[in-house]
């Protein structure tokens, strides 16, 4: 047995693996609960702090984060949505009315209610969730409830060790709101491409005709003809919830890892672990919610 094989089969490694599983599914779950308490405490203490983040500044922070997250996710959503729409259109156009009836009756409701929100979740976990976790892991401030650092406009002071309650809210809340809004926008972009591909029978030349602004009224007719209104609303709410989960879990694990790094108690791999653990927990949580909903 080689040294590498011996290491992976040793009792110490097996014990470390068990400890790692406990860290993933017990400790991290508890961190999500603690982070909710931290946010609640920060909201309660924010009004009593001397340095205030005004509503206009907060609104600008949210708008800026929405714009950034939309730009970050636009290309993968548009590319994936276009390919998905053409693929569905080819299936519909290639197999005729029998397949079209099956898709209208069974496939479209499932796709719009569950499949598209799951695709949104996967895309945003990879693009946005990892960015949030990585950003907050390396953030120069660690939250402490009695901190009073920062500037009057709500911008955190990079030279300080601790952030105040208002600084925590100004950093984390816009990320969560922006990701939730982006998830809804991404859902509707995917839905738009799927409808366009369906109506074009997967032909690129016909697709360009379908998505022309003069033809946009056809999408309303399509939604009404297929009775997709309630299903689209359900898919929008699922996407909103998934977007919230993506940002919240990434923020919770990212700030926890950042605190350990600042305090000198972190392991060398904590930065990387926070990124992929947030994605893994989000996907498992969302999958569990879908399974329970069914």
Image: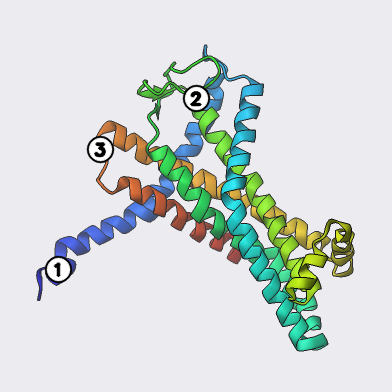
Q: Secondary structure at mark 1?
A: helix
Confirm whether residue 86 shows in the render.
yes
Above or below, 39 relative to 283:
above
Question: Horizontal and vertical percent for residue 259?
Answer: 35, 34
Q: CA distance from mark 3 to mark 2?
A: 23 Å
Looking at the figure, which quarter contains the C terminus?
bottom right
In the image, which disc is placed on residue 207?
none
Residue at x-position 44% and y-position 38%: 34
Residue at x-position 89% and y-position 69%: 225
Q: Which residue is mark 3?
A: 265
Q: 264 or 73, which is in the foreground?
A: 73
Q: Are marks 2 and 1 in contact (CB under 8 Å)?
A: no
Quarter assignment of residue 255: top left
For discs 3 and 2, the disc positioned in front in the rendered view: 2
Q: Earlier in the sequence, mark 3 or mark 2?
A: 2
Number of marks in picture: 3
Q: CA distance from mark 2 to mark 1?
A: 47 Å
Residue at x-position 87% and y-position 61%: 215
Q: Earlier in the sequence, mark 3 or mark 1?
A: 1
- Badge 3: few (under 14), some or many (20 or more) residues near its Cα, within 10 Å? few
In the image, which disc is placed on residue 167?
2
Above or below, 198 relative to 32:
below
- Badge 1: few (under 14), some or many (20 or more) residues near its Cα, within 10 Å? few
Q: Secondary structure at mark 2?
A: helix
Residue at x-position 25% and y-position 37%: 265
- Badge 2: few (under 14), some or many (20 or more) residues near its Cα, within 10 Å? many
Q: Earlier in the sequence, mark 2 or mark 1?
A: 1
Confirm whether residue 294 shows in the render.
no
Q: Which residue is mark 1?
A: 4
């Amino acid at each position: 047995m080689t040294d590498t094989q011996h290491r992976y089969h040793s009792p110490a490694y097996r014990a470390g693996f068990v400890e790692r599983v406990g860290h993933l599914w017990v400790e991290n779950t508890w961190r999500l609960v603690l982070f909710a308490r931290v946010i609640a405490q920060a909201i309660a203490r924010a009004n009593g702090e001397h340095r205030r983040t005004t509503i206009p500044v907060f609104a600008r922070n949210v708008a800026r984060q929405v714009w950034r997250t939309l730009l970050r996710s636009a290309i993968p959503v548009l590319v994936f949505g276009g390919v998905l729409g053409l693929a569905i259109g080819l299936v519909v156009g290639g197999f005729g009315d029998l397949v079209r009836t099956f898709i209208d009756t069974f496939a479209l409701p499932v796709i719009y209610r569950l499949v598209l929100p799951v695709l949104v979740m996967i895309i945003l976990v990879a693009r946005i969730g990892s960015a949030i976790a990585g950003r907050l892991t390396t953030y120069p401030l660690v939250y402490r409830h009695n901190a009073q650092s920062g500037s009057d406009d709500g911008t955190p002071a990079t030279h300080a060790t601790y952030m105040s309650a208002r600084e925590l809210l100004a950093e984390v809340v816009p990320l969560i709101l922006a990701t939730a809004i982006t998830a809804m926008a991404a859902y509707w972009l995917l839905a738009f491409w799927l409808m366009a591909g369906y109506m074009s029978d997967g032909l690129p030349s016909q697709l360009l005709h379908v998505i022309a602004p003069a033809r946009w009224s056809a999408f309303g007719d399509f939604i009404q003809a297929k009775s997709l209104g309630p299903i689209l609303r359900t898919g929008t709410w699922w996407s909103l919830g998934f977007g919230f989960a993506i940002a919240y879990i990434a923020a919770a694990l990212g700030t926890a890892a950042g605190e350990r790094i600042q305090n000198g108690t972190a392991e060398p791999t904590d930065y990387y672990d926070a990124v992929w653990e947030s994605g893994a927990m989000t996907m498992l949580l969302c999958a569990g919610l879908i399974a329970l909903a069914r």
